[in-house]
Amino acid sequence: MASTTKLRELILYLALESEGDEHFGAIKLNKLLFYIDFESYRRFGKSVTGQVYQALPFGPAPRAVVPTLNSMEEKGEIAIRMEPLYGHTQKRPLALRHPALRLFSQEEVALAAHVLSRFWDMSATQVSELSHEFLGWSLAENF
């Protein structure tokens, strides 16, 4: 099983950098992780986090994301704020500490920043719809 260390730190990075993005919540977090890992694999031959992904109704997500978020919340690394957004409740991860960016290469940090920028103005629904166009999502096992 892959280590969750880089997953934890990438979650912190994305949460910290997304503080001003009203659309950032758990669903968008999953899609950002997906795009970062799969684009890293395409560019560099390996994912950033090494996580296994699953197909969910709103698109791909790392299998370890829910237990990782729960563990991070228990350890006081993040808080999950429930916020109303367009008639739904958004689960918004908030970073309570800075990520350990030393665990990432400069290319990995630049890629994460690029993905954040690319999807900044998009809602979780829009990002999810795009992820459904990815062939791997349609072929993946559903959980």
Image: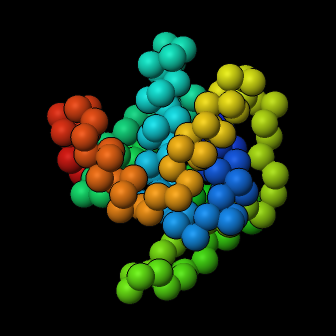
Q: Residue at x 61, y 64 (%)?
A: 21
Q: Is residue 85 visible?
A: yes
Can residue 67 be seen from the camera position used here? no
Could you say where residue 133 lies in the image, as x and y percent from the top left? 25, 40
Direction from residue 42 to residue 126 in the image, left or right = left
Q: Position of residue 18 (x, y in %)?
A: 65, 58
How are the residues colored?
rainbow
> Residue drawn 40% across and 35% down?
52
Question: In this figure, what is the number of numbered marks?
Answer: 0
Q: Residue at x 34, y 54 (%)?
A: 128
Q: Is residue 111 above or below residue 123?
A: above
Task: Give the side of residue 31 with respect to residue 8, left or right.
Answer: left
Q: Would you say 99 lies left or right of 12 here?
A: right
- Which residue is pictured at 56% across the width and 33% down the height? 49
- In the image, 56 versus 32, the foreground residue is 32
Q: In the visual, does 105 lie left or right of 82? A: right
Q: Could you say which quadrant of the image residue 69 lies in?
A: bottom right
- Vertical order, 118 against 94 (above or below): above
Relative image position of residue 137 (x, y in whole percent) = 26, 39
Looking at the picture, how far across and down is residue 37, in whole percent? 49, 32
> Outermost residue, top direction?
45
